[in-house]
Image: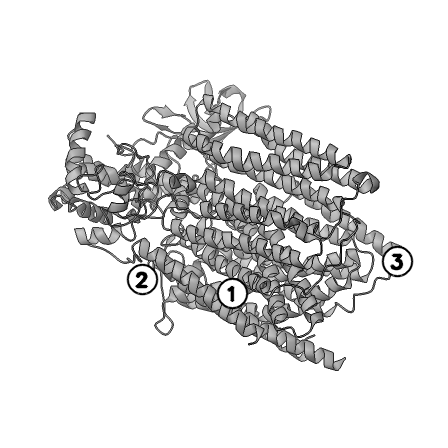
């Protein structure tokens, strides 16, 4: 037998072993999970999402189905989980009500668990759950509702009315998910952190932050496009009162900033750093509005990653008027 | 040697393919905002079709990028050592390259057509963002083609060793120094666009420095041929880096807004966070792959060889190929760790999905493959000791090394959570984790054993090197060179480890979101690294006092204790008390291990230099089994490349471009591991058959060349 033929036989044996390992592992982990296209808000639709696109199965098992143990088993499993999640949600909701003093229904508990998983963790588990409405999972609201109906049906009663006509608490979370989806699937939690780290130096929300830029409380009413444009091309549309002025003094000194106060004798110019410069009008040679520039950094898109940008957008879309 | 007729046909084919690629790029404009369009070819699954073609292209691409690296290293060794065998070997592999090169280009063209026709929206968008880079890619492709032909056809033309006039040498030296100086200035951000440190280091170390060194060494026609080889690799690496920027961008897009519009300089999109870590990983992977494919060629030739002379030649060829491959294989896990860390930094969800989600079991399969690579490499070295008279003195160590490798292998592939039935969990007292095995599945254990595997492989290599040497040669009698090199290696080791110890001593726990009292864990690690620095000083002193063996043993023992035993256990404490610090522990392990490899290898270089040989190496006196192990290594690394490609690409989930362009096709789901093994197996099979065909073509051309002579 030639060397090439022997090598070929060895190759086939090696690939055979590789295929056997692949088949064994796939069989151990529950087969291939295919899903694509839209699903209905129903337990069947939720099941498709749970074992497919939602990737819930990578962390949760359901009784004897699946092999993941990182997060709580959502079925009936051993002494730790005597009730499946549909029934367990009622108990958890009671505990949550006692803990917060706010009335929780079983559906509220399930909605909260998906929208804000760190709100009420199962003892012995860390918050390792992904934001399911942000990339890469990026479930839309209907898909999340479908998963909730699937979880309700696990040992409990399916309550579509509670999903379609949510309580105030659940509606708040649904709004959060909608806002995030509208912003391209950002994570509002991370967006809030990013905002505090970068934007809050100049902008205020609920009384916290700098005063160089406009107060952003309730900014979501202006719509996603306005917010996106304001971040990407801040000079395009400047909020009234925050126009950029250039003051040239008689000695040639130039100061650029917002005209934050003006009296008969003097003008206050707030610079991008927050520093306020008071200039006597008598010393001013010229004061002009620079319509082509904004005090906001022009290179934010370079400083922020795409993900951070989407997260900040998602956060801003949640800033509604009280 | 291939005939000019073949080369003309290759060049023509290459030209046609390149022209079509360029036409395709021009034809499709950016259409990012339109809904995604998907098409099918003959009703086939478009994703699997693209997967197959892309993986095949990558295999051939890795070969044509890896082999020139391998060839130029071999050529330099032959040139420096005056050993013509190395030169012949480098030439033999380069001759195989010219056939593979055209196939790679043809596959690249096929891939481009398939992508543009089956995924027009996605490719239109990519071409819109990266149009400049794509043109640069095409131009570099021409540069690589011309350099490859110059390198191959100029081999005999530039084989002379008559020195060039002094003026020419002086000009080359000045140019070389200038290029290196420009590289240094570039590295320290003296010019160029705003780039991250890893990209600057990559460009400096792989473009500026090799070119500068290539110019510095020019003294005769042969050395100028080496420069052409270096430039060929620079062009090849450039092509790889450009293409990696697209793959990286798909995982970690940058420089574009949420609609995918380019908002800033193209550099930002080009130098996205994962582009360079992927390029570094691929670079080492290509070198190991190139070496092992060359080794497989030698193995097949050995198995078929009829004469002892042929056996001896191909045995030696296999040894050299494997040696180069192991050299690249040893740092590869660290490059992989760096890439993984950057993936985590880019997106924790992506990172979790990688190590603990969809791909956790894929990583178990990968552990089986990588562990096999190391064990089989060791087996090949041990088999090689049978051809070395005197090496039988070291056989007694093999069982211990094998034991360490097997235990490490077992730990490495143990998953954290086992898929268990309710009954099995009941038998374990209701716990979902095995009481002992659960620890084996965590990072501290895995980091410890991969370091032990590398250290054991290095130990095997040391035994192999000293196999036929009777005894050490006192370093004190070897002139000035060891007195310069060993302390220099010691300094490098101390600088690597010491700077990190200093960093840890001054690290603010707040930077890792840890309370202030956690600084004690940083300090313990820093002090342990200072012990390693002290050990390095002792090693240098002992070596210079002719106690090199003791010095090597001491440093390897200290490293093994620190990296494997101490940090293997202490890692769990850190995981419990200061989990975010765990990544720093891995860096500390890597630095100590690398410092050990550098210093011990430097001492070893002189320890047996000119030592009396017990007997001549009996090339060709190798078992046939050992040649099958070389073949297995090649198959496994190829399978592993396919598997890693699946993970890298699959991490995006159902996104073409993570967070920007969603995959809305019917194939937007993560395939199972079985689908992966099926797809990878098919690609590996086609690739291996293709390589066998090319090797056969190469041998035909070689036979014709002999006849003509």
Q: Distance between the residues labelled 3 and 2?
A: 67 Å
Q: Do labels 1 and 2 share a chain?
A: yes
Rounded to the nearest angstrom, the CA distance separating label 1 from label 3 is 44 Å
Label 2 Cα neighbours within 10 Å, binned few <14 / some 14-19 / many ≥20: some
Residue A289 visible somewhere in the drawing = no
Chain of the residue on which disc 1 is drawn: B
Can you identify the residue that label 2 sits on?
A: B666
- A186 versus B248 height, above or below: above
Dot 2: element: loop
Q: Nearer the viewer, mark 1 or mark 3?
A: 1
Give the residue number, with chain letter if any, for mark 1.
Answer: B57
Which quadrant would residue B161 be assigned to in this image?
bottom right
Residue B90: x, y in percent?
70, 64
Residue B13 placement: quadrant: bottom right
Quadrant in which the N terminus of chain A appears? bottom right
Q: What element carries label 1?
A: helix
Q: Position of residue A44 (x, y in %)?
A: 18, 54
Which SS class for mark 3? loop
Q: In this view, does B327 lie to the left or right of B263?
A: right
Q: Mark 3 points at which residue?
A: B165
- Mark 1 surroundings within 10 Å by alpha-carbon count, few (fewer than 14), some (14 through 19), many (20 or more): many
How many numbered callouts?
3
Res. B503 mark: none
Query: Which of the two residues, B173 or A254, is positioned nearer the viewer here?
Result: B173
**Structural crowding at the residue carrying mark 3, measured as other residues with C-alpha within 10 Å and reported as few (<14), some (14–19) or many (≥20):** few
Discs 3, 2: same chain: yes
Residue B55 visible: yes
């Amino acid at each position: 037998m030639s060397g090439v033929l022997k090598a070929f036989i060895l190759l086939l044996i090696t690939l055979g072993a590789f295929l056997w390992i692949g088949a064994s592992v796939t069989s151990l982990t529950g087969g291939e999970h295919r899903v694509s296209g839209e699903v209905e808000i129903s337990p069947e639709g939720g099941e498709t999402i749970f074992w497919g696109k939602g990737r819930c199965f990578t962390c949760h098992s359901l009784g004897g189905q699946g092999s993941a143990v990182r997060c709580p088993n959502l079925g009936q499993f051993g002494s730790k989980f005597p009730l499946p999640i549909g029934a367990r949600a009622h108990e958890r909701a009671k505990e949550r009500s006692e803990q917060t003093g706010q009335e929780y229904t079983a559906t509220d508990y399930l909605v909260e668990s998906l929208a804000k998983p760190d709100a009420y963790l199962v003892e012995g588990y860390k918050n390792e759950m992904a934001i399911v409405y942000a990339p890469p999972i990026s479930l839309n609201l209907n898909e999340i509702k479908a998963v909730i109906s699937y979880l309700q049906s696990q040992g409990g009663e399916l309550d579509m009315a509670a999903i379609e006509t949510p309580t105030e608490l659940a509606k708040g979370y649904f709004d959060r998910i909608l806002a995030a989806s509208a912003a391209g699937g950002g994570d509002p939690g991370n967006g809030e952190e990013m905002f505090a780290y970068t934007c809050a130096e100049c902008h205020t929300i609920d009384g916290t932050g700098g005063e160089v830029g406009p107060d952003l409380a309730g900014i979501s009413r202006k719509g996603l496009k306005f917010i996106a444009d304001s971040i990407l091309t801040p000079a395009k549309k400047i909020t009234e009162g925050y126009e950029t002025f250039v003051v040239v003094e008689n000695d040639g000194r130039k100061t650029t900033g917002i005209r934050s106060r003006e009296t008969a004798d003097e003008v206050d110019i707030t610079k991008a750093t927050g520093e306020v410069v008071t200039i006597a009008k008598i010393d001013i040679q010229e004061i002009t509005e620079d319509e082509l520039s904004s005090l906001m950094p022009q290179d934010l898109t370079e400083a922020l990653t795409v993900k951070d940008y989407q997260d900040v957008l998602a956060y801003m879309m949640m800033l509604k008027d009280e | 040697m291939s005939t000019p007729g073949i080369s003309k046909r290759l060049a023509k084919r290459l030209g046609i393919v390149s022209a079509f690629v360029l036409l395709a790029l021009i034809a499709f404009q950016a259409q990012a905002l339109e809904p995604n369009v998907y098409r099918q070819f003959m009703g086939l699954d478009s994703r699997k079709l693209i997967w197959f073609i892309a993986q095949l292209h990558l295999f051939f691409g890795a070969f044509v990028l890896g082999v020139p690296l391998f060839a130029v290293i071999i050529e330099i060794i032959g040139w420096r050592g005056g050993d013509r065998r190395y030169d012949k070997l480098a030439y033999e592999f380069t001759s195989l390259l010219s056939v593979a090169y055209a196939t790679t280009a043809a596959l690249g063209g096929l891939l481009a057509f398939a992508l543009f026709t089956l995924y027009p929206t996605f490719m239109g968008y990519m071409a819109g963002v990266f149009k400049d880079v794509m043109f640069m890619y095409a131009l570099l492709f021409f540069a690589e083609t011309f350099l490859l032909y110059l390198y191959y056809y100029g081999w005999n033309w530039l084989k002379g060793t008559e020195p060039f006039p002094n003026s020419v040498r002086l000009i080359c030296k000045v140019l070389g120094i200038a290029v290196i100086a420009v590289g240094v200035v570039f590295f320290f951000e003296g010019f160029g666009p705003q780039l991250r440190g890893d990209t600057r280091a990559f460009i400096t170390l792989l473009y500026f420095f090799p070119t500068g060194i290539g110019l510095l060494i020019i003294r005769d026609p042969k050395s100028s041929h080496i420069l052409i080889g270096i430039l060929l690799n620079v062009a090849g690496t450039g092509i790889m880096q450009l293409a990696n920027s697209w793959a990286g961008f798909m995982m970690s897009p940058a420089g574009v807004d949420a609609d995918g519009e380019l908002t800033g300089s193209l550099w930002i999109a080009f130098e996205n966070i994962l582009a360079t870590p992927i390029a570094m990983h691929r670079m080492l992977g290509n070198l190991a792959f190139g070496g092992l494919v060359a080794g497989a060629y030698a193995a097949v030739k050995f198995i078929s060889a009829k004469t002892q002379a042929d056996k001896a030649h191909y045995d030696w060829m296999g040894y050299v190929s494997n040696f180069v491959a192991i050299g690249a294989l040893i740092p590869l896990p660290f490059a992989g760790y760096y890439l993984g860390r950057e993936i985590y930094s880019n997106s924790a969800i992506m990172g979790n999905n990688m190590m603990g989600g969809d791909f956790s079991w894929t990583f178990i399969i990968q552990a089986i493959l990588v562990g096999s690579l190391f064990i089989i490499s060791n087996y090949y070295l041990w088999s090689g000791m049978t051809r070395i008279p005197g090496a039988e003195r070291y056989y007694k160590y093999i069982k211990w090394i094998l034991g360490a490798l097997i235990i490490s292998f077992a730990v490495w592939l143990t998953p954290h959570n086992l898929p268990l039935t309710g009954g099995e969990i009941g038998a374990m007292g209701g716990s979902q984790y095995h009481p002992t095995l659960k620890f084996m599945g965590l990072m501290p254990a895995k980091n410890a054993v991969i370091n032990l595997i590398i250290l054991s492989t290095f130990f095997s290599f040391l035994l192999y090197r000293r196999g036929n040497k009777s005894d050490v040669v006192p370093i004190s009698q070897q002139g000035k060179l060891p007195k310069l090199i060993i302390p220099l290696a010691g300094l490098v080791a101390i600088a690597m480890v010491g700077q990190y110890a200093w960093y840890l001593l001054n690290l603010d726990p707040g930077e890792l979101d840890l309370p202030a009292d956690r600084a004690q864990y940083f300090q313990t690690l820093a002090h342990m690294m200072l012990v390693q620095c002290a050990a390095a000083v002792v090693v240098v002193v002992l070596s210079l006092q002719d106690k090199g063996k003791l010095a090597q043993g001491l440093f390897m023992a200290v490293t093994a204790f620190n990296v494997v035993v101490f940090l293997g256990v202490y890692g769990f404490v850190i995981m419990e008390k200061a989990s975010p610090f765990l990544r720093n522990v891995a860096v500390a392990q890597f630095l100590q291990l690398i410092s050990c490899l550098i210093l011990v290898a430097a001492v070893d270089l002189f320890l047996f230099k000119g030592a009396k040989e017990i007997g001549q190496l009996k090339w060709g006196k190798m078992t046939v089994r050992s040649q099958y192990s070389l073949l297995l290594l090649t198959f496994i690394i190829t399978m592993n490349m396919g598997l890693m490609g699946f993970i890298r690409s699959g991490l995006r989930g159902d996104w073409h471009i993570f967070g920007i362009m969603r995959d809305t096709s019917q194939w937007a789901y993560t395939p199972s591991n079985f689908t992966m093994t099926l797809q990878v197996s098919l690609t590996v099979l086609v690739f291996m058959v293709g390589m066998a065909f090319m090797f056969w073509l190469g041998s035909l051309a070689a036979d014709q060349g002999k006849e003509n002579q």
